[in-house]
């Protein structure tokens, strides 16, 4: 009887050429999709906008600390996408970045609530679909000039010979605090 092989053990049985072909087909991207979540798309987008473009580890930290109800299903979805990347293509979780995250409206459940004097009021329960795409940063060869595009001022990119060699975004919109509301 054939044993169920998971994770890296399964990848050991695949040759390097087959794994390289699989990675090239997906272009270093892996996604997870969750449908019919009982939440409005507007409330889920509030959380998704915070995690788009961040690394996998930073995203997990943010989602655990944020006080919104939408964080839990999104956290499960990010875990699922990372498990897909690790299990199917053998990517390391340290190199994963959320390249695309989108929330789409789904159907709305309509119910009637009985009220006084024989009347009824409609209750609308919106649902949404969430899709998260993770990209492996080691799959692409990143140019130093592309890394410096995150800087806010254009003259920083032009005059980058001696200054700003640490490749970080120096001019963000906050003062560095986690809960800065600017």
Image: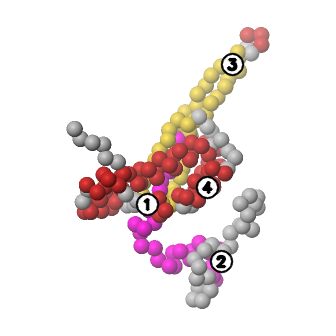
Q: Mark 2 highlights which residue?
A: 153
- The mark closer to the camera, 4 or 2, is 4
Which residues are drawn in magenta?
A: 129-157
Which numbered disc, 4 or 3, marks the residue that appears first in the sequence?
Answer: 4
- The mark closer to the camera, 1 or 2, is 1
Q: Is residue 159 left or right of residue 116?
A: left
Which numbered disc, 4 or 2, marks the residue that appears first in the sequence?
Answer: 4
The quadrant of the picture occupied by the N terminus is top left
CB within 8 Å, label 1 to label 3: no
Q: Secondary structure at mark 1?
A: loop
C-alpha span from label 1 to label 2 = 33 Å
C-alpha span from label 4 to label 3 = 40 Å
- The mark closer to the camera, 1 or 3, is 1
Residue 157: tell me if it is visible: no
- Say how the picture is coloured: secondary structure
Task: Identify the residue at image location x=62%, y=30%.
Answer: 125
Q: Secondary structure at mark 4?
A: helix
Task: Identify the residue at image location x=77%, y=13%.
Answer: 116
Q: Mark 1 highlights which residue?
A: 92
Q: Position of residue 159 (x, y in %)?
A: 60, 87
Q: Is residue 173 left or right of residue 70?
A: right
Which numbered disc, 1 or 2, marks the residue that appears first in the sequence?
Answer: 1
Task: Identify the residue at image location x=62%, y=22%.
Answer: 111
Q: Is residue 131 left or right of residue 47?
A: left
Q: Mark 3 highlights which residue?
A: 113
C-alpha span from label 1 to label 3 = 50 Å
C-alpha span from label 1 to label 4 = 18 Å
Q: Secondary structure at mark 2?
A: loop
- The mark closer to the camera, 4 or 3, is 4
C-alpha span from label 3 to label 2 = 56 Å
CB within 8 Å, label 3 to label 2: no
């Amino acid at each position: 009887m054939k044993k169920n092989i998971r994770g890296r053990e399964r990848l050991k049985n695949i040759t390097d050429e087959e794994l390289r072909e699989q990675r090239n087909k997906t272009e270093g991207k892996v996604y997870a999709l969750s449908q019919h979540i009982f939440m409005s798309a507007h409330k889920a987008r509030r959380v998704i906008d915070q995690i788009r473009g961040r690394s996998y580890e930073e995203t997990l930290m943010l989602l655990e600390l944020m006080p919104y109800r939408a964080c839990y299903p999104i956290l499960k979805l990010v875990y699922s996408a990372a498990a897909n990347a690790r299990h199917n293509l053998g990517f390391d979780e340290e190199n994963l970045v959320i390249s695309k995250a989108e929330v789409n409206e789904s159907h709305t459940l309509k119910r009637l609530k009985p009220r006084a004097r024989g009347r009824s009021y409609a209750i609308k329960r919106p649902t949404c679909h969430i899709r998260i795409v993770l990209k492996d940063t080691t799959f692409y060869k990143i140019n130093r000039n592309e890394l410096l595009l995150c800087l806010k001022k254009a003259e920083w990119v032009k005059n980058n010979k001696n200054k700003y060699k640490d490749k970080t975004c120096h001019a963000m919109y906050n003062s560095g605090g986690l809960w800065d509301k600017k």
